Image: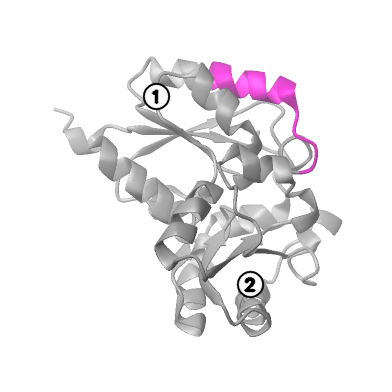
Amino acid sequence: MTSETDIPYIGMLCWESGHVPRGLVQLESLVGNSTNPASYAYPVRFYHVKGANIHTILENPDREVLGRMIEAAKEMTTSGIRAITTSCGFNAIFQNELADALDVPVFTSSLLQVPLAQKIIGGSGEVCVITAKKAALKPAHLEAVGIRQTDKLHIYGLEACAQWSRIFSAPDEDLDIEAVRNEVVGVALQAVEQHPGMKAFVLECTDLPPFAAEIRASTGLPVFDFMTMVNYIHATLC
């Protein structure tokens, strides 16, 4: 007999299989990564969307792919899925379209937690977003997830980091994961040094939660990421 704890309440829209850079495949092996089943204390159903990849989601959001995402999400909800999420924080730009098209909660990106972080740290506090690629994170992404206050919001991209940037410049080659870990923590420390009023971090990229604990330990600040969001939403469902 299937118990309630065996039921996957959350469905995840993922990039198309075979269209993920080698470095991201390595990062997916880390517990805490959004597409690693071992990251969850509950079952999650994964759906790989045809045409979804680094180009059509992160660099140039494609509305045709959005249509496929909506179709896939509707199919999942007919089989018991009670909430929909995605495997890339840049799907924030599609938050409203997906939520309006479905009859279940939709949480596309950890960026949804930015307004929460801003509220709980008080008006004088500053929030840092660490993103996979700053140049690709547009005002439209922020607006779509309800981010209105941007004067004390600092966005740091990882594309200038030598090892991380290989995801884009050398997608068929391996990454040095420990070097990536050091780069991510280093960016967080740099943000705190440059902005002493920093009170919280939000990690946009769903590949970054495996490094969240080290950011917390190194900076002493709260860190919101994909896992804090998905665990919160799951708790509301069951």
The label nearer to you, 1 versus 2, is 1
Q: Magenta region: which residues?
A: 59-72
Residue where numbered disc 2 is placed: 184
x 50%, y 61%: residue: 209
Q: Nearer the viewer, residue 220 or 185?
A: 220
Q: Position of residue 205 (x, y in %)?
A: 60, 54
Residue 31 visible, this orientation: no
| Callout 1: SS | loop
Query: Tag 1: residue type?
Result: Val
Q: Nearer the viewer, residue 211 or 150?
A: 150
Q: Quadrant of the C terminus?
A: top left
Q: Position of residue 69 (x, y in %)?
A: 59, 24
Q: Position of residue 107 (x, y in %)?
A: 48, 38
At label 1, counting other C-alpha atoms closer than 10 Å, the crowd grade (few under 14, some 14-19, many 20 or more) is some
| Callout 2: SS | helix
Q: What main secondary structure does the magenta stretch of the protein show?
A: helix
x 51%, y 81%: residue: 219
Query: Tag 2: residue type?
Result: Val
Residue where numbered disc 1 is placed: 104
- Colour setup of the view: one colour
Image quadrant assignment for residue 198: bottom right
Please give the label number shown on residue 38: none
At label 2, counting other C-alpha atoms closer than 10 Å, the crowd grade (few under 14, some 14-19, many 20 or more) is many
Is 146 colored magenta in this rendering?
Answer: no
Image quadrant assignment for residue 10: top left
Q: Nearer the viewer, residue 125 or 164?
A: 125
In the image, residue 222 above or below residue 227: below
Q: Position of residue 204 (x, y in %)?
A: 59, 54
Horizontally, is 146 left or right of 159 in the view?
A: left
Q: Disc 1 versus disc 2: distance between alpha carbons?
A: 34 Å
x 66%, y 24%: residue: 66
